[in-house]
Amino acid sequence: MAETVELGDIEAARDRIDGHVMRTPVVPCFDLSDRCDGDVRLKLEILQPTGAFKLRGATNALLALSPEDRARGVVASSTGNHGRAIAYASKLLGIRAVICMSDLVPQVKIDGIRRLGAEVRIVGKSQDEADVEADRLVREEGMIFVSPYDDRAVIAGQGTIGLELLEDLPDLDVAVVPLSGGGLIAGIARALKSLKPSVEIVGVTMERGAAMHESLKAGHPVPVEEYKSLADSLGGGIGLDNRYSFAMTRDLVDRSLLVSEEQIAEAMRYLFRVQQLAVEGGAAVGIAALLNGLLDVRGKQAAVVVSGRNVDMDLFTRLATGELNGLP
Ligand SMILES: *Cc1c(COP(=O)(O)O)cnc(C)c1O
């Protein structure tokens, strides 16, 4: 099996997920365009039924399984958007799914994933302990593990965003993409660089706990300390045994930028006040980079991937009104 994801894999993913996943619109942001002296467009992955783009990769990964593997069921270890995506896609396709999480996870998140149709298994006091249970299900019960970012079918699924961007914006100059494990940016970058090599690909993540950013600097995957962040969906490591997303990000991404908690809060508030969009912190990092001039898009067309909307609404309201400027 090839150790990367090619354009053909992404095109196959698009055909596979068509009808199961939204083809999302890109909308202009006139205010940000004025401020940046460029043409800024927003790719609204917040419109996916699970609230985030991860449905693309999860759906492609499940559809690509052989009938034998589908019968074995899938397991994921995620309390966030990947867990929701696996739950939703597995229900749609009639595949058994088990999502492992620790007993630190708030009840609303557990209920949300159960409601989407997956079995939730609560184990231990940390996500690491939940990961051990996921490993056990794979080893002892023969279930199929689906990584949120380091999986060829997942990366190909996220890459379908790149195909849609170029169809809608043939003059695109810059793509600004939230960056965590790198599945999203790796897929988008492969699609864009294959079809239009001049497009610049910029990753953005939070200052605190930027695993891919530090790994790119080191030249290999490194562990980072984890902190609480408004961009909780960008947390976590990239896996010290990373197989695909690190090398693809290293080879295809032009720049990696960091934004502060205050800048993320400001960007969430901005998207709500100016564009009437409620988004989670991890989805606002690209806007934060542009609002703060970290990236020069003068005279260029830039697409910002607005990746998800799964945010605690009490927290969101306090951020949107300016009562908070970061986590409480
Ligand atoms: C997972 C996620 C990301 C980052 O995607 P990676 O493939 O891990 O880089 C960005 N935004 C949201 C909302 C996410 O859920």
Image: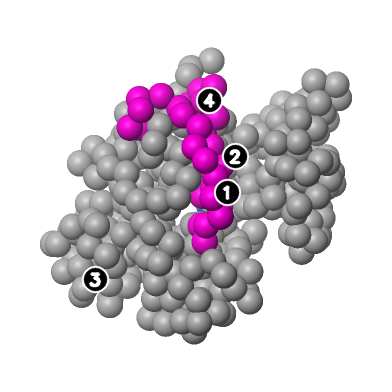
User: Label 4's element?
Assistant: loop
Residue on which disc 2 sits: 148
What's the residue at 76%, 59% (across, down)?
106
Q: Image quadrant of residue 98?
A: top right
User: Which tag is nearer the camera, tag 3 or tag 4?
Assistant: 4
Other residues around mark 4 within 10 Å, as few (<14) / some (14–19) / many (≥20): few
Q: Which mark is residue 240?
A: 4
Q: Is mark 3 within 8 Å of ligand 1?
A: no
| Spatial separation of the CA atoms under disc 2 and disc 1 | 8 Å
Q: Residue furthest top?
A: 1
Contact? badges 3 and 4 (CB < 8 Å): no
Mark closest to the chain's N terminus, 3 or 4? 3
Q: Which residue is mark 1?
A: 54
Tell me how far mark 2 sits from mark 3, CA to CA. 32 Å
Between discs 1 and 3, the one toward the N terminus: 3
Amino acid type of the residue tagged 4 in the rendering: Leu
Q: Are marks 2 and 1 in contact (CB under 8 Å)?
A: yes
Query: Would the CB of label 1 be found within 8 Å of ligand 1?
Result: yes
Q: Earlier in the sequence, mark 2 or mark 3?
A: 3
Nearest to N terminus: mark 4 or mark 2: 2
